[in-house]
Image (tube, rainbow, N blue to C red):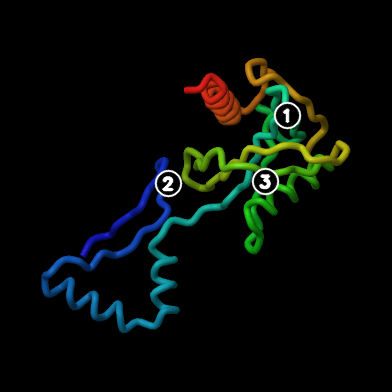
Amino acid sequence: MRVVSITTAGITLLSYLDFSGTGPAVRLLAAVWRRLPERVQWRLRWLFNPKFTVGAGGVVLDGQGKVLLLKHTYRRRYPWGLVTGWVKGDESLEHALRREAAEETGLSLSIGRLAAVRKDRFGLFLDVVFVCRSSGGTFRPSNEVSEIRWFRTDDLPTGTHPDHVALIRGLAEVQQRSLAGG
């Protein structure tokens, strides 16, 4: 018996017990596992797998190659950043991102393709980032965001979160390569 993990970009997406061995201990464990009620199997899986908070983020682009950044009121070191927020237990990633954009800015988003899945350096949260477009609404400051501005991807303001800079520049590079045919 061995634990098999399916991992992408350093993030474990799925772990399971592989009972493909042939020894008597493996056969015994497999027989016990099969007899456990599904509820117990799920609890054991939950107990032995990593837990983390899930966030949804958006790289909001316009037609001229500019990115929308929000000036967050609660981030002292890096006030400028992308639209981000935590996913509530029963909502989809896309719904969470639309909700956060509306709550923080008053803007509506059209959500496009998946841009990145990344985790923080401590492994406490998983962030799922989409490429987006603004699809309406009027900015209104909130308790969390005091200002929004469009910036060229090669001219981001001082105080932009370094993780967001890397995401924005990486997407801009991919877009440039696809426009150049490569």
Q: Position of residue 156 (x, y in %)?
A: 67, 19
Q: Position of residue 18 (x, y in %)?
A: 26, 64
Assign a secondary structure to mark 3: strand
Between label 1 and label 3, give the one nearer the viewer: 1
- Residue type, mark 2 in image: Ile
Quadrant, the N terminus: bottom left
| Residue beneath disc 2 | 11
Name the residue: 69% across, 27% down.
Answer: 67
Q: Residue furthest left?
A: 23
Local crowd size for mark 3, using a 10 Å CA cut-off: few (<14), some (14–19), many (≥20): many
Relative height, residue 63 to residue 131 (above, below): above
Q: Earlier in the sequence, mark 2 or mark 1?
A: 2
Name the residue: 63% across, 61% down.
Answer: 89
Q: Earlier in the sequence, mark 1 or mark 3?
A: 1
Assign a secondary structure to mark 1: loop
Name the residue: 57% across, 42% down.
Answer: 114
Q: Residue furthest front?
A: 181
Local crowd size for mark 2, using a 10 Å CA cut-off: few (<14), some (14–19), many (≥20): some
Front one among 80 and 76:
80
Q: Is residue 163 left or right of residue 182?
A: right
Relative height, residue 10 to residue 5 (above, below): above
- Residue type, mark 3 in image: Gly
| Residue beneath disc 1 | 62
Q: Residue furthest top?
A: 155
Q: Which mark is residue 85?
A: 3
Relative height, residue 126 to residue 147 (above, below): below
Distance from Cα at disc 2 to Cα at disc 1: 30 Å
Residue 171: quadrant of the picture: top right
Disc 1 + disc 3, Cβ < 8 Å: no
Local crowd size for mark 1, using a 10 Å CA cut-off: few (<14), some (14–19), many (≥20): some
Q: Is residue 18 left or right of residue 161?
A: left
